[in-house]
Amino acid sequence: MKKLFIAALLFVGIASFAQEADQKPAREPREKLTPEQRNEKQLKKITSELNLDANQQVQVKQLLAERSAKAEKLREERKNRKDSNTKPTAAEKEAFKNELKAEKDANDAKMKAILNADQYKKWTAIQEEKRDKAKEKMREYKQENN
């Protein structure tokens, strides 16, 4: 009887310990910002990183607002497509990819026109660093979920 009782306690202890190890720590919820708040936050960050003057700040603020509006439009289109359960064809995916690339190139050209040579060089380095971080996070995410 004692052995059965000890075995039952051991089993319950191991089972409860295993469940705790499987649970992932919850991420902190992000604060919900309006597009205008996000743009202001991003403008402040860019201003401090690149030492923008007042004229450049106005131009970058306008560029961020345009980008934000286009991104919101794309999000709405994706949501509508998801709600209607229509899968995009390979041609539509390719067209969308090309559209995003063209948009990125246009934004880069606008930033190059706004910033001086040193600022643009620093901005491209920051963008590359962000891209590398995102790729690393994706690798980590894929490893966790495989």
Image: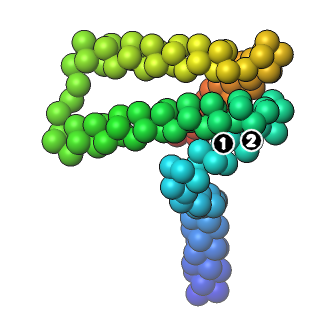
Kind of residue indicated by mark 2: Lys
Residue position for label 2: 45
Residue 65 showing in the rendered view: yes
The part of the image, by quadrant, that contains residue 76 is top left
Kind of residue indicated by mark 1: Gln
- 52 relative to 31, above or below: above
Residue 45: x and y, percent? 74, 41
The part of the image, by quadrant, that contains residue 116 is top right
- Secondary structure under the numbered disc 1 in the rendered image: helix
Q: Tell me how the rendering is colored.
A: rainbow
- Secondary structure under the numbered disc 2 in the rendered image: helix
Q: Is residue 74 left or right of residue 140?
A: left
Label 1, label 2: how far apart the Cα atoms are: 5 Å
Q: Is residue 127 left or right of residue 68?
A: right
Residue position for label 1: 42
**In front of the other: 106 or 140:** 106
- 140 relative to 109, above or below: below
**In front of the other: 49 or 143:** 49
Count neighbours of disc 1 (C-alpha within 10 A) and say few if under 14, some if 14 to 19, many if 20 or more: some
Residue at position x 31%, y 14% in the image: 95
Count neighbours of disc 2 (C-alpha within 10 A) and say few if under 14, some if 14 to 19, many if 20 or more: few
Residue 57: x and y, percent? 70, 36
Residue 111: x and y, percent? 64, 20
Tags 1 and 2 touching, CB below 8 Å = yes
Residue at position x 49%, y 32% in the image: 67
Residue closest to the far bottom:
1
**In front of the other: 137 or 78:** 78
**In front of the other: 20 or 131:** 131
Residue at position x 34%, y 19% in the image: 96
